[in-house]
Image (cartoon, helix red, strand yellow):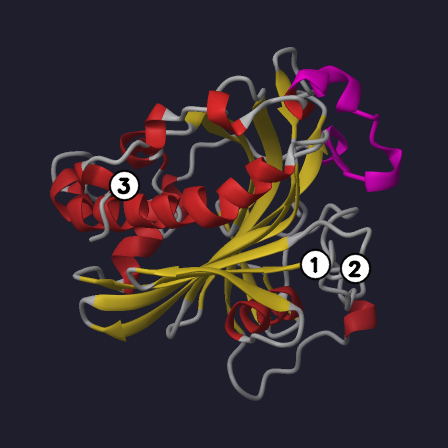
Amino acid sequence: WRGPAEGTVLCVQRFCLRVSAGYLLFSRTPAGTAPFPAAQSPLLPPLLTAMDGRLLGEVRIADDKDFLDFKQACLKHDSGWEQKYNRHGTVVHAKLQDADSVKLLKVSVTYKKVCAATLYDVLHDPEYRKMWDPNMIEAYEICQLNPNNDVGYYSWKCPAPLKNRDFVTLRSWLETGTEYMIINHSVNHQKVPPKKGFVRGISLLSGYLIRPLTSDSCHFTYLTQMDPRGSLPKWVVNKATQFYAPKMMQKIHKAAMKYPAWKSQHRLSWKPWLYPEQITVPRVTLSDLSPVIMAALPDSSSDIMEEMEALEEDFEDTNFSKDEDTDPA
């Protein structure tokens, strides 16, 4: 991707890629412009069709099909989805696709007093995330593939006796004019190997769909298929669907309402997710990346045997205690 000269325009599967400052800048191909046939695409491999872990096992940017499938999964409630929670406008569904798969979790809510563009900025802004995400230990961008795709690290604080988790994911985002999407899947990065004290979790596919409703309201869906690795007690999984997910959505709503005032005092015009000329993250070295192959992963259960015996009555998470910030908005 470093090869084309400045100003070169490539058409790839309905995207127009313009080379600028060494990056490929994405825009929709104008009507009537013929894209490359899939077999001739110089950047994107043939599509996979299965929803379960479609991107996992590959190192590539998400394409139109990936975003469309993600959107449909967010909006459709076909057979297999089971409602786990429905309070204060937040609805949680879970789905087990087959006996050997990782459960899908879907959380949807309508936000008032928050426009779609503001919520999109909140989910992107790394400086603001530390203000609203009580679970975050550390998060940073490792490298940039292009202005719409990066690889990042995120570590997640789990309350004792559970062990902390961390993730390395390839993240892709898209603004269509009528909606916003951010999706990710796990990859390996040579310079960020698993480290002591953390269990390396796997994101098969996770992401956000934001759809504007009015000038100051939007519908927000979070969909994730994540394997935390190890053998967590069943009550932990239940707590995630019935407690953590709704509370996190409330946290994000509160954060989004406060974001414009905060941003006005913190580098107001700095938004590299919108303005690629502001990107300072190192460019990707492709040899540093490799796909995550589930069947080849080492057994991590021996590292967290004590988690299997954890009792819910001994569990306390002060990050999500009932307080003003986590009351329903």
Judging depth in this view, the residue of 14 and 209 nearest the camera is: 209
Residue 315 located left or right of residue 33: left
User: Of the residues tagged 1 and 3, which is closer to the observer?
Assistant: 1
Say if the magenta span includes residue 299: yes
> In x, y percent, where is residue 2?
64, 44
* Figure quadrant of residue 114: bottom left
Q: Which residues are magenta?
A: 286-306
* Figure quadrant of residue 54: bottom right
Callout 1–callout 2 Cβ contact below 8 Å:
yes
Judging depth in this view, the residue of 252 and 210 nearest the camera is: 252
Mark toward the start of the polypeptide (2 vs 3): 2
Residue 96, numbered label: 1
Mark 3 surroundings: few (<14), some (14-19) or many (≥20) residues within 10 A: few
Q: Amino acid at mark 3?
A: Trp
Give the secondary structure at mark 1.
loop
Give the secondary structure at mark 2.
loop
Q: Which residue position holds label 2?
A: 98
Q: Which residue position holds label 3?
A: 270
